[in-house]
Image: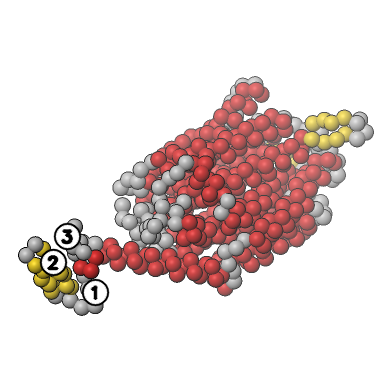
Amino acid sequence: MAEVRLEPLSTSEKLCYAVGEFSGVMTYDIISMYANIFLLEVVKLTPLAATAVIFGSRVWDVLAYPLLIPVLNASKPNKWGKYKTWMAASTLIVIPSYVLGWYVPGIDSGGKVAWYLVFYSVFLVSQTAYTITHRTLLMYMTEVPAERDSATTYRILCHMLSYLLAIAVHGQIVAAFGTTESASCVNSTISNTSTASTTDPETGYLVSAGTTAAIITIAVCATLFGVKEYAGSTGPGDDTSRGTLLKDIWEVCTFRPFADLVGVGMLSTFGTILQQWSAALAIQYAFGLEGQLQNIFLALLGTSVLTVPVAALLLTRFEKKLVLAGFALVVMGVSVGMMYVPARRLDVLLVMVCLAGIGFAGPNYIPWTMLTDVADDFKIQKGKRRDMLFQTLFQSLNITAVLLASVTSIVALESYNEKEEKTYRSGGYQTGSCTQPDSVAFTTRLLVSFIPAGATLLSLVFLWRYQLTGERLAANKAVLEERRTQQAADTNVNGAAPQLSLTMKSQDVPDTRGPVQLTYFGPYGSFRVKHH
């Protein structure tokens, strides 16, 4: 495996790297957007049981990061590539566990809880291993910041496209396996006759899972065979050794630029995921547009995809910090507006959803370009390379935010204070019923509006504290360029450079100003050798 890459990344390499994101995102997003409604409406679990499944599997997902770090660090580079090997191994576990996570076994409720807890946990842990290694791979494809940002742009485009593909594949396949019958699904807030799926959604979910598995297999193969992994460069004094895990984690977490970026990332992720997890139920019960669910999701994600190139262009003209702040303000305004969208007004909702898609592009894209800046700054300031640890911890803490958001969504539906009876019951949401009380409509509106807006507002505080701005980034870029140039020069002359012997003194170093001159000091005198 080559030490360092000198030439820029080709477009095909960037694309091959980017499509690997389909495996890391497509399956994860389908579960994020549809697991709620699948466990409640298809499997017929109670909100409390669904919470146990989601919370338990997400806990394992969070724990996977500290468990995987020492294992990944201990694995040795190989001819094919250390990180590519892990990607291939992880995919072999991801695919069967993902498919089985959509199968409905013919067992009692307790058995179903155990079934989904096991397979969701296995899927999330193996998916975590894949995501860590795939995103760390970029650090070993090139060390040029501009090339990394360009590759990240391609990756985020595929990230957004995977959203669209997830909705198109999963939503349309599941819809194709169900016919509809007129049903009296009247929300207590909305007088509306909608439709309820009645035939074979279980088979639809399985067919969708199999189709998704085929897509991600092709995507992972494109990355494995289309990208070359390099060992990476080290500067003078760089420490690539590993101390204790806790010491390394503490050193990275207390690095201020990283701590501030984590605050931005976690709060943005919490707001985004909370809206995703609550969107399906909000569209159904708060906005009364169940039949438009797939179209609304496509509008949301389509505008996000189209906005990523715009965000990338803005990053070439303005500081990342300023651009991200602008997107955050859009998210806040749209989120608050979602609380007041009238029921059954598809036109108004589509406008708000498209604006939300524009706002989501920033938080989903820009923090990842900032993370590579933080890792490079740490390498320069501390003289230590901890690229995988940065990627791992950032992803781990974001997953913690995902855990909090997903549990908040379901617990909010589970908990409802029945004022008239003065009891605390599993109220709002009634399992298996298409008619829900007012509390469900109000709660789902709250989950997609004020709570995400508040989280985004707090993220701006951490963004204001973030230190890596124009001058410091320019200085870091100059240092990294000098290191790459020096290492390339050392590599080119490595085989031909004269080696100093033990009898040579410091003044006998070759004179680079003219012909090479060596002075020999021996027992019979000294003499100078001139070599042209």
Which quadrant of the view contains residue 10? bottom left
Q: Which residue is mark 3?
A: 503
Q: Are marks 3 and 2 in contact (CB under 8 Å)?
A: yes
Q: Secondary structure at mark 2?
A: strand
Percent across and percent down for residue 243 are 45, 44
Percent across and percent down for residue 298 are 63, 54
Q: Which residue is mark 1?
A: 512
Percent across and percent down for residue 84 are 39, 47
Residue name at image x 84 percent, y 45 percent = 190
Report crowding for label 1: few under 14, some 14 to 19, many 20 or more residues within 10 A (C-alpha): few
**In this picture, is 143 found above or below 416?**
below
Q: Which mark is residue 40?
A: none
Residue type at tag 2: Tyr
Residue type at tag 3: Thr
Q: Which mark is residue 520?
A: 2
Percent across and percent down for residue 493 are 24, 65
User: Which residue is farthest bottom?
Assistant: 514
| Mark closer to the observer (1, 2) | 2
Q: Secondary structure at mark 1?
A: loop
Out of 95 and 104, give the one closest to the viewer.
95
Residue type at tag 1: Thr
Which quadrant of the view contains residue 89? top left
Residue 159 visible in the snapshot: yes
Out of 106 and 363, give the one closest to the viewer.
363
